Image (cartoon, rainbow, N blue to C red):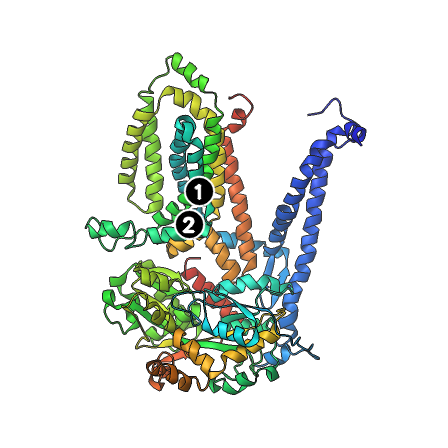
């Protein structure tokens, strides 16, 4: 047996891959083909469905009809990804570099929300963000807010819900990336006169802050100019204070694989999410996940639902491919870092 | 890249990719084949009979020689129901006296799950096993009459042996006998009937009486409509002066347009199933299209909630117990249905649930428990109230598909 394996040792990698591939074929490739076939059906639940290649028109029709929800899904998930990045990066940085004895405790606290079900966490946000609830109630009682003000059933609540639910997915990969970085590189950088990044830090911070402000303004339905201005100012101040060259030239590039992995883990599920929009949103914040659910469950319109799922999958693949190109992480993971 | 030390196994990357492609293609062909057969069982059952829903449905699902039901009492009965729909202990929300009484008499433990929030949502969960001919895991489910009609039309409901249910056959109120989807009442048994109207917090809105309040900008952002198409559209039709029982497509379009204007103006906060009750208690919502019994039950938590049938009119509906096809405990389910059709048990449930009771003699029994409740118009509606409510028209499949489609667009999906 041993010598048989030795003679065919070039086959061993494929044998090792076999269980994983089998799982993929059974639970991904086959259902995807099944979905593709379903999208070429026409008919109704009671009269039965028939397959026909001429039903390819389902795709452009579905795309045109639900283009708003598609666009909204991309916008909301992009904003949520950016927000999780903004929150998770400092968090992961603090845990990795300043954690010390409390590193494990802090990591546990990051993951602790996952001990509760996803649905319960989102429902608990409904209670926390209630119009007269824990947060808004006292503020309204003190008179700082108009009684008609609400956070629930707005895009803010939906995006915040997505951000909250997917935060650990962004924190942990970035933490891992930063953790295994060689600290001596930053020391070396500082020895070579790396100091506060001026004026680059201010400018980069301002531009970045402006972009984030614009994105948030657009998805939260705020007026754009104040949003961009606030974002730029906050970004500029933050950039001046926190960005130094050692960070920008050494730490940041080395942590990009973690950022990339974390972004994918947030962006991809967020695009198909429907729970947050259902529980925390209103009729005009519905995402493509809600549409697919409605088409499938309420209307029994399986062809359209399958077509939408397929287009969502292709769309996500396209976005990820572009993102991977933009980040250029192939070079970074080629072994040239820590 | 080529490995210079390659052995004779010749599993090159090209060969490997070809193998994967072949597997994928095989899966593709398998999927093609499966879709063919999975489409036809759907088409088989209903299209074997007359395609028009309605009169000829009972004969369609009659088997030539029905297999005898296994007459043993099961140890467990899986019962799926809507929330707030059975008498519940005030202190312990998992204890239900009716279920305990049933267990005391027959020994069967009833596993009660309040998992139904919306007819379509629940149908989605049981559709796949029913299509595949598998048991759904439920022995009893409660669904509104139009969904019950669809399930019976599709042949997915078990047929009762009415000789096992002597009480039911006697005490069922006449108005529920012989609907067009089940002429002999042998596939469904009404659980409760109810009305759809306005639910509101009178401390905030005052006492409302007209459905025009649903379009009042004063409550913008704090109003919810129902995802139940027939209820939401029904109330709107009355508001426009039309009768839901005789709705035409044009009237329906008008109603949808009116609701669309409320959505566009930001008046409607959300379209909900039963969730509106929690929102009313929490104060997020001050006015909601509501179901008659829910508000009364929530008054325990928030005393200022009220329910009214709007002056313009409300919608009448009834929910029905069905036994999904493939349930192993049909006999026990029949016993349970018969049990809840005893007037004293029906009165016990009605005293808590506050919906319209479909059981003859329940009013007298309820008077023994609680005089005031026996006079409660929501449980035993007087003729004036019944005159203001109508059920939604029984729809053909085309109409249903069209209306569901338009309504889905309205609610943003």
The residue at 31%/21% (across/down) is: A199
Work out which residue is located at the far front of the displayed protein and give it: B104
Q: Splitting the image into 4 quarters, where does residue B34 fall? A: bottom right
Q: Decide if residue A119 is on the left or right side of residue B332.
A: left
The residue at 45%/82% (across/down) is: B344
- The answer for which chain carries disc 2 is A
- Quarter of the rendering occupied by the C terminus of chain B: bottom left
On the image, the x and y values in percent for residue B189 come to 52, 78
As displayed, is residue A50 above or below residue A276?
Answer: below
- State the residue in front, A255 or B278: B278
**Mark before the other along the chain sequence, 1 or 2:** 1
On the image, the x and y values in percent for residue A309 come to 54, 51
- The answer for which chain carries disc 1 is A
As displayed, is residue A246 above or below residue A132?
Answer: above
Residue behind mark 1:
A112
On the image, the x and y values in percent for residue A69 come to 44, 51
Badges 1 and 2: C-beta atoms under 8 Å apart?
A: no
Residue behind mark 2:
A121
- State the residue in front, B109 or B213: B109
The residue at 31%/29% (across/down) is: A238
On the image, the x and y values in percent for residue B73 come to 61, 74
- State the residue in front, A286 or B107: B107
Work out which residue is located at the far left of the displayed protein and give it: A143
For disc 2, the neighbor class at 10 Å (few under 14, some 14 to 19, many from 20) is: some
- Quarter of the rendering occupied by the N terminus of chain B: top right
As displayed, is residue A119 above or below residue A300?
Answer: above
Please tell me whether mark 1 or mark 2 is closer to you in this view: 1
- State the residue in front, B22 or A184: A184
Q: Decide if residue B275 is on the left or right side of residue A298.
A: left
Residue B25 seen anywhere in this rendered image of the structure: yes
Residue B392 seen anywhere in this rendered image of the structure: no
Question: What is the number of the mark on residue A286?
Answer: none
């Amino acid at each position: 047996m041993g010598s048989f394996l030795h003679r065919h040792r070039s086959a061993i990698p494929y044998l090792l891959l076999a269980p994983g591939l089998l799982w993929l074929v059974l639970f991904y490739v086959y259902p995807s083909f099944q979905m593709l076939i379903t999208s070429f059906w026409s008919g109704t639940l009671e009269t039965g469905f028939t397959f026909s290649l001429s039903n390819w028109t389902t795709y452009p029709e579905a795309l045109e009809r639900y283009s708003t929800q598609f666009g909204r899904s991309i916008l909301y998930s992009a904003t949520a990804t950016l927000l999780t990045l903004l929150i998770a990066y400092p968090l992961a940085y603090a845990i990795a570099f300043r954690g010390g004895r409390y590193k494990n405790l802090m990591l546990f606290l990051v993951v602790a929300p996952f001990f509760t079900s996803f649905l319960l966490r989102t429902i608990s946000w409904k209670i926390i963000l209630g119009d007269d609830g824990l947060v808004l109630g006292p503020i309204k009682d003190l008179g700082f807010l108009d009684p008609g003000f609400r956070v629930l059933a707005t895009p803010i609540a939906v995006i915040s819900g997505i951000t909250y639910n997917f935060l650990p997915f962004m924190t942990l990969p970035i933490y891992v990336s930063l953790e295994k970085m060689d600290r001596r590189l930053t020391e070396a950088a500082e020895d070579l006169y790396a100091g506060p990044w001026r004026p680059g830090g201010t400018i980069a911070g301002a531009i970045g802050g402006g972009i984030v402000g614009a994105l948030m303004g657009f998805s939260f339905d705020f007026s754009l100019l104040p949003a961009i201005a606030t974002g730029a100012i906050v970004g500029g101040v933050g950039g001046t204070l926190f960005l130094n060259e050692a960070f920008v030239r050494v730490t940041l590039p080395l942590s990009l694989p973690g950022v990339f992995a974390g972004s994918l883990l947030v962006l991809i599920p967020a695009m198909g999410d429907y729970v947050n929009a259902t529980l925390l949103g209103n009729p005009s914040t519905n995402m493509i996940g809600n549409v697919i659910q409605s088409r499938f469950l309420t209307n029994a319109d399986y062809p359209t639902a399958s077509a939408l799922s397929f287009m969502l999958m292709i769309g996500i693949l396209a976005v990820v491919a572009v993102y991977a190109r933009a980040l250029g992480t192939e070079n970074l993971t080629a072994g040239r870092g820590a | 890249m080529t490995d210079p030390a390659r052995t004779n196994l010749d599993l090159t990357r090209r060969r490997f990719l070809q193998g994967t492609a072949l597997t994928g293609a095989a899966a593709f062909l398998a999927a093609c084949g499966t879709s063919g057969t999975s489409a036809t069982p759907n088409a088989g059952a209903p299209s074997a009979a007359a395609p028009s829903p309605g009169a000829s449905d009972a004969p369609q699902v009659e088997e030539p020689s029905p297999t005898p039901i296994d007459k043993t009492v099961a140890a467990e009965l899986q019962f799926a129901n809507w929330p707030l729909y059975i008498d519940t202990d005030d202190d312990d929300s998992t204890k239900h006296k009716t279920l305990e009484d049933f267990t005391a008499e027959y020994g069967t433990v009833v596993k009660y799950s309040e998992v139904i929030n919306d007819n379509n949502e629940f149908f989605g969960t049981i559709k796949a096993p029913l299509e595949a001919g598998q048991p759904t895991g439920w022995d009893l489910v409660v669904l509104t009459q139009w969904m019950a009609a669809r399930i019976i039309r599709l042949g997915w409901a078990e047929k009762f042996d009415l000789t096992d249910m002597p009480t039911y056959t006697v005490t069922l109120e006449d108005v529920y006998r012989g609907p067009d989807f089940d002429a002999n009442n042998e596939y469904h048994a009404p659980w409760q009937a109810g009305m759809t109207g306005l639910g509101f917090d009178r401390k905030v809105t005052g006492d409302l009486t007209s459905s025009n309040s649903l379009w009042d900008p004063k409550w913008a952002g704090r109003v919810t409509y129902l995802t139940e198409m027939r209820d939401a559209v029904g109330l709107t039709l009355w508001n426009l002066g039309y009768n839901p029982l005789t709705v035409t497509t044009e009237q329906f379009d008008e109603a949808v347009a009116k609701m669309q204007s409320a959505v566009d103006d930001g008046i409607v906060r959300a379209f909900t199933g039963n969730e509106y009750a929690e929102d009313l208690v929490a104060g997020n919502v001050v006015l909601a299209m509501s179901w008659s019994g829910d508000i009364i039950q929530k008054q325990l938590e928030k005393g200022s909630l009220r329910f009214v049938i709007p002056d313009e009119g409300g919608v009448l509906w009834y929910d029905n117990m069905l036994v999904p096809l493939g349930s192993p405990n049909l006999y026990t389910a029949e016993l349970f249905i018969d049990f809840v059709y005893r007037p004293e048990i029906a009165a016990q449930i009605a005293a808590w649930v506050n919906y319209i009771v479909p059981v003859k003699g329940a009013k007298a029994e309820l008077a023994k428990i609680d005089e005031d409740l026996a006079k409660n118009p929501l449980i035993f509606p007087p003729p004036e109230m019944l005159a203001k409510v109508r059920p939604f028209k029984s729809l053909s499949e085309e109409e249903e598909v069209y209306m569901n489609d338009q309504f889905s667009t309205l609610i943003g999906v």
